[in-house]
Amino acid sequence: MAVQTPTRATAGAPTRSARPETGQPWKERWAGLFFVAPFLVLFAVFLLWPTFSGLWNSFFNTSLSGIKGEFLGLQNWREMFNDPAVWSSLRNTLVFTAMSTPPLVVIALVMALLANRKGLLGWLLRFSYFAPFVLPATVVSLIWVWIYQPGFGLVNGLLTAGGFAEIDWLNTENRAMLAVVITTVWWTVGFNFLLYLAALQGIPAQVYEAAAIDGANGRQQLFRITLPLLSRTTGLIVVLQLVASLMIFDQIYLMTDGGPNYATRPIVQYIYQNGFTNYRIGYASAISYLFFVIIVIISVLQFKLFSGRKEARG
């Protein structure tokens, strides 16, 4: 009677395994894909498809009705680079971003430092600082249009009480952008304040206690402990604020409608006017892609800047 001996696996022979190389069973991996499938579908339908569809439309004379027009090649792109309204709107957008981003970061940090305390005063400050952020754009715009009104507005009332002349804030070219920036800071600083406050409450109290035992005063604790530990939060807020400011539209559209004399018209409003007022979806798509590339370049430069600082600190 012959005896069968179990075969031994040779070193070079392939072996079947129920686990992938990551060590996770295949069933669990497919289950994971099943759970993320709804997000992937929505991501593809509402982000990837519009992105590629917009690029495709930029080469056609597409109208708002959805009827595909004639193929124009790069005509929309050549017209865009020769359109002075594109560059003036883009300049207004960059000016608004440069004017609004620094105060929205610095003021939010100061507000968080003031509100980072226990007791009734801390809760009152947190509510007061964050409350404007929950208001809709229409309400905020209506409030500040009345505040800026000549004759009976609060700002001009304070100016005349101090002996200064009234200013028609929203109808003066060199004042309208400043008026919109002040409104935006008052309205949106609460979001950055909330991020800073959460980061401050994540710093262990033992760090400050050890510094106090070593003789560090409040100023030294602020500049040697608090601000360095908030550097990651600051980087996040700067990136988010830059992107949000570049996409400015609501308050300018409601307060000045891009005026006076297009002095405050941002690039997003010009895209809107071409696409939904002039019915030129193809041309609006070409401008949108120019703006998209600019946002990507600014975001990459911002990321490189903060990455370089982190590597320098070791």
Image (tube, rainbow, N blue to C red):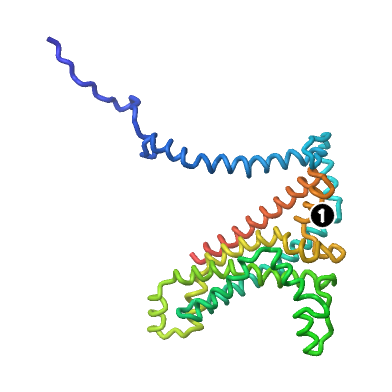
Q: Residue at x 56, y 39 (%)?
A: 41
User: Does 93 sit above or below residue 66?
Assistant: below
Spot the residue most to the left: 1
Quarter-of-image position of residue 163: bottom right
Residue 290 at x, y percent in the picture: 75, 50
Q: Nearer the viewer, residue 227 or 136?
A: 136
Residue denoted by label 1: 86
Q: Nearer the viewer, residue 186 or 215?
A: 186
Quarter-of-image position of residue 58: top right
Q: Nearer the viewer, residue 16 or 86?
A: 86
Q: Residue at x 87, y 64 (%)?
A: 261
Quarter-of-image position of residue 203: bottom left
Q: Residue at x 77, y 56 (%)?
A: 269
Type of the residue with mark 1? Val
Q: Secondary structure at mark 1?
A: helix
Quarter of the image for the N terminus: give it. Answer: top left
Is residue 296 toward the left or the right of residue 234 in the image? right
Mark 1, other Cα within 10 Å: few <14 / some 14–19 / many ≥20: some
Residue 213 at x, y percent in the picture: 38, 84
Is residue 234 toward the left or the right of residue 88 in the image? left
